[in-house]
Amino acid sequence: MRRVFFLILLISELAIGQTSPSSDSLRTIETQSVSIIGFQNKYIGGSSCRVNNTQLQKMNQADINKVLRSMPGIQVRDEEGFGLRPNIGLRGTPVNRSAKITVMEDGILMAPAAYADPAAYYFPTFARTSGIEVLKGSSQIKYGPYTIGGAINLLSTSIPATFKAFAQASYGSFAMNQQRFWVGDTKGQLSYLFEINRLASRGFKELDGGGNTGFDRRDYLGKVRWQSKATARVQQSVQLKVLHTEENANETYLGLNFTDFQENPLRRYSGTQKDLLNLFHNHVILQHVITPFKQLQITTSGYLTQTFRDWGRASSFGGQSINAIITDNNTNQLGYQIMTGQTNGEVVFRSAARHYITKGLQTNARYQFKTGALEHSIELGLRLHQDEANRFGTQSKYQMTSGLMILTDGGEEGNQENQIRQGTSLAGYLNYQLHYKDWTLNSGIRQEHITLSFLNYGNADFARTGANLKSAVNQIQVWLPGASLYYDLNEKNSLFTGVHKGFSPPGMPNTTSGEQARAEEALNYELGYRLLSNKLQLQAVLFRSAYQNLLGSDNISGGGLGTGDQFNAGKALVQGLELSTQYLMKLPFLKSIQVPLHLNYTFTNATFSETFINGGGDWGVGQINSGDFIPFIAPHLLNCSVGVEHKKWNALLSANYLGTTRTTPGQDPSIVAISNENYALVNSIKGFTIIDFSCNVELNKQWTLYGTVQNIANNLQIVANLPQGYRSALPRTLVLGLKMKL
C-alpha cells in the first residue's frame, strides 16, 4: 500500500511534462493551498464559516475561545482563562482537550500525536493567527482522522507580495501583554516572512501565600519561498516554513470546592504552588505547489513536528486523592487541610513528561475542466502519517510545612508512567464536484488504514530493558463515503443537503485485556438554507449524527483516573439546529457610519441510545440508561454582537451565552451548585453570559490605537468543573495597545 502511495506521488510530479488541454477552466486555482475553504467558494458541500484577518483585527482577541463562540455549532469549555489550551467540540462532539476534531494550521495536522495521543496539550498560539476556518458536513472527510464534528484550520501570516511590516504591543490587567512583529517581502522569485510573537501574564488566580499564576508563551515563525517566473510555462513554488514555540505556565489542574469558590472564585490552593507546565514545540513544513497547466494544481507537503511538554502537578494530599477531597472535603478533612497549607503533611507530586514526534508526507491534486455546460472538479489526496508519544512520568514527594512545599523524594524518572504510544496512518480521499447551472453535486470517499501500537514498560523498568513489557497492537481500516447537493434558488438564496459517514480512531489498545475499543462511527446528515446579499447573510442548518460505538476515555482532564483507556458506549444520537445571521445596517443620517449586526444560535440535543454500565472516565461510574443526556454538551449556545464602524475607527460589543450544561448523564431536572446543595447531587453547571468590548482608532495610515475589555460585567460565575474542581472565567480585563503597519 505504501508503494502505491509513493507511486501516485511520483506520477503527480511527472505531470509537469504533460501538454496543456483546453484553457477554459471553471475557476481560478489557488496559488497557495493553505486554505481549506477559500474566500469565494460558496459551493462547498456542507456548512462552513471563516473569520479573516480584517475581522480578527477588529476583535483584538488573543483568546481563540472568544472567536469560536462567534460561530455556530461550536462549543468551547474555559479552563485557564486565556484560551491557551482550548477544549473544543463541534456539533456535539466531546470538548475535552479538543480530542475529537481535526485541528490544522495551514492545512497540516497540528496535534502533537493526532493518532497515538489525541488528547495532547499543544494548540497553536491564536494571538499570531491571521484567520480561522471551520468546516462541517460531508466535505470534512478530506481532513481526517476525525470526521464526525468538523475540522478547524488556523491560517498563519501569509508572505506579502510587496514589502510589508507589522508591529503590535499591548499591556493590561494582570500584566497581560503582547508583543508581535512581522516583516515580509517579495523580490523577484524569492519571498520571505519572519514573525515573533510573545504573549504573557502574571495570572489572575490568587495563590495562598502569594506567587505568580500566569504564563509566558513565545513563537518564532519563518517562511521562505521560491516561485517560478510569471512567464514560465509551468508555474510552481517551493516554500519552507519553520515554527518554534515555547511556554512556561504556572498553571494547575486543581480548581476549588464549592464553598471556597463562593468565598473567592479566584483563589488557588497552596498545594498547587509547585504546579508548572513547560512546553517546547518545533514544526517544519516543506511544501511544493505546481500548476502543470491551468486546470491542474498539485500540492505536496512534507512535515516534521517535535513537541515536549512536562506538566508537573500535585496528585494527592495526605494519601487522599484530589477528586475525593474536592467532592467531599469534610470526609477527607486531613487532605483538605494539607492542600490548603493549614496542616503539615505529605504531598504526592507527578511530573507528566511527554515527548511527541510527528512526521508525514501528503499530496493533493485538483483537476478542473468543462464538458459543454458541465463543470467538473476532481480532487485526489494522499497522506502517510506517523506519530509517537513517549511518556515518562515521574512521581515525587513533598512535605507541606507551614504552607510551603519542601521536596523530600525526587523519585525515579518513569516511576509513574513509562510507555510508548505509536500510530501510523495511510489515508487517501477522492472528491468529485459537478456543477450544472443552478446545481452542484459534491461526492467523495475517504479511506484510512491505521495501526496503533502500545508499549508499556511498567513503572520499575527505568532503563526500558523490556523485562516487564506489555504490548498490544490495534489495526483499523475504514471507508468513509459522503455526498452533498447544492441548489441555487436565485442569485441570493440557496439550499444544500448532505450525508457522510464520520469516524474517530479508537486510541491506544488495551494491554490489560484482550478486548480493544472499536472505532467510533456516525452517519451524519445536514439540511441547510443560505442567503447571501450585500447587506444580509443568513444560514440555517439542521444536523443529525447517529453514532455507533460511541467512544469515551479515562483522562484526568475529563474527570477520570488518567489511565488514558478508551471504551465504547454503544449507540448515541446528536441532533440540532444552527442559525447564523449578519446584517450590515446603514445610518441614513450618518452615511459615514455603518452598523454590523451579528447573531448565531445553536441548539443541540445529545442522548445515549443504549443502556450500559460505565466504568469511569468521561461519564462517571454506574448504569447509564437509554435516553440519558450526554454530559458536557450544552443544549443552547447564543452569540450576538453589534458594531459601529467608520473609516477611521470601529467598535464592537459582543455577548456570549452558554446554557445550563449537564455534568453527569441522566434525564432528571438540572441541579446546579447552590449554597444548600450537596456536591454529590449536583448534575449541571448553570448557564452564564460573558460580555466583551473592542475598539480601534486609526491615528494615521501607520498607527492604530486599540483597546479591549473582556468580561465587562465581571461575571465570576462557575464556567467549568473540570479538571478537578470549579473555576471561573477570566475576570474583567482591560487591555490597551498600539499597532503599526508599513
Image: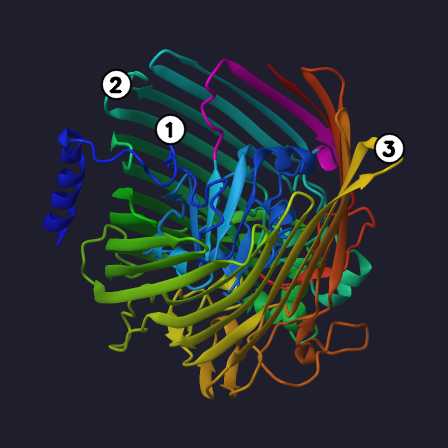
**Which numbered marker is on residue 232?**
2
Quote the CA–CA distance across marks 1 and 2. 28 Å
Q: Position of residue 334 (x, y in %)?
A: 65, 68
Q: Nearer the viewer, residue 140 or 317?
A: 140
In what element is the residue under mark 3?
Answer: strand
Return the residue found at the far right.
589
Tag 3: amino acid: Leu
Circle 3 is placed at which residue position? Answer: 590
Residue type marked 2: Ala
Q: Is residue 614 above or below residue 360?
A: below
Q: State whether residue 114 appears in this view.
A: no
Answer few, some or many: residues within 10 Å of disc 3's Cα (few below 14, many 20 plus, some between 14 and 19): few
Earlier along the polypeptide chain: callout 3 or callout 1?
A: 1
**Quadrant of the rendering where the C terminus is positioned:** top right
Please say whether residue 119 is one of the residues in the magenta stretch.
Answer: no
Identify the residue at horizontal 44%, vertical 27% (top origin).
221
- The tag earlier along the polypeptide, 1 or 2, is 2
Residue 520 horizontal/vertical position (percent)? 37, 71
* Spot occupied by residue 427 in the image (x, y as percentages of width and height): 25, 54
**Amino acid tagged 1:** Val
Numbered disc 2: secondary structure: loop
Label 1 or label 2, whichever lies nearer to me, is 2
Q: Which residue is mark 1?
A: 242
Q: Nearer the viewer, mark 3 or mark 1?
A: 3
Judged left or right of residue 655, residue 114 is: left
**Secondary-structure class at tag 1:** strand
Label 2: few (<14), some (14–19) or many (≥20) C-alpha neighbours in 10 Å: few
The image quadrant where one finds the N terminus is bottom left
